Each structure stands twice: as C-alpha cells, then as structure tokens.
Image (cartoon, rainbow, N blue to C red):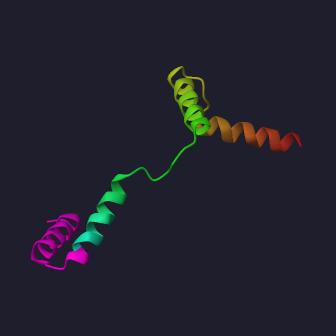
Amino acid sequence: MDATTDLKNSLISRIKNSNDINFLRALQTLFDSSEKSLYQLSEEQLHSLNESREEIKKGDYLDNEEVISNTKKWLKSK
C-alpha cells in the first residue's frame, strides 16, 4: 500500500471509532470548505479569464520560450 492509501485508511478508522461530535463537526467543516472554490473572482476577472481561454483556443498566445526570448531581446535593447 502507498502512503496515501495508508493515511486514508487510518483516517477512516479514526472517524468510525470517534464519538466526539465536536471533532466530527470540525472534520465536516474541513471537508465542506475544501470542496468550495478557493477564490472568489469578480465579474471582470471571470471575463478576463474567459477571453484568455478563447485566445488560447485560437492559438493567439506565446509559449514560455518565446516570452523569455522576447524579454531578453528587449532587455538588451535598453
């Protein structure tokens, strides 16, 4: 078994054996919060992300190497 499986099994066992309602509620809160979105984005941010995704679909972007190359050229010209 790998470490992840061992940890899951250990947690499952501890949860099953616990009668501490506060502990179980705290775990429930952790699970609930981990399932929610980590970031609340504004409408403007969501719009910007959607525009960027469309540009990527159209191939309208530079890959990392191109950005680095362009930046080096720009820095040399200064």
- Residue 65 part of the magenta-drawn span: no
The image quarter containing residue 51 is: top right
Which of these two is toward me, 35 or 66? Answer: 35
Q: In this view, does 66 lie above or below 5?
A: above
Between residue 72 and residue 59, name the one nearer to us: 59
Which residue is pictured at 33% across the width and 65% down the height? Answer: 30
Image height check: is 54 above or below 38? above
Left or right: 36 in relation to 16 = right
Task: State the residue in front, 12 or 2.
Answer: 12
Q: Nearer the viewer, residue 2 or 25?
A: 25
**Residue 50, image x, y percentages:** 53, 30
- Quarter of the picture holding the N terminus: bottom left
Residue drawn at x 29%, y 61% as measured from the top left: 31
Q: Quadrant of residue 5?
A: bottom left
Q: Is residue 21 left or right of residue 32?
A: left
Compared with 29, 70 (above or below) is above
Where is residue 44 drawn, in percent x and y? 61, 36
State the residue lying farthest toward the top.
58
4 magenta-colored: yes
Q: Which residue is drawn at 15% across and 76% down?
A: 14
In the image, the segment drawn in magenta is: 1-23
Quadrant, the C terminus: top right
Toward the front, the furthest residue is 21
Q: Where is residue 25 in the image (x, y as percent from the top left)?
A: 26, 70
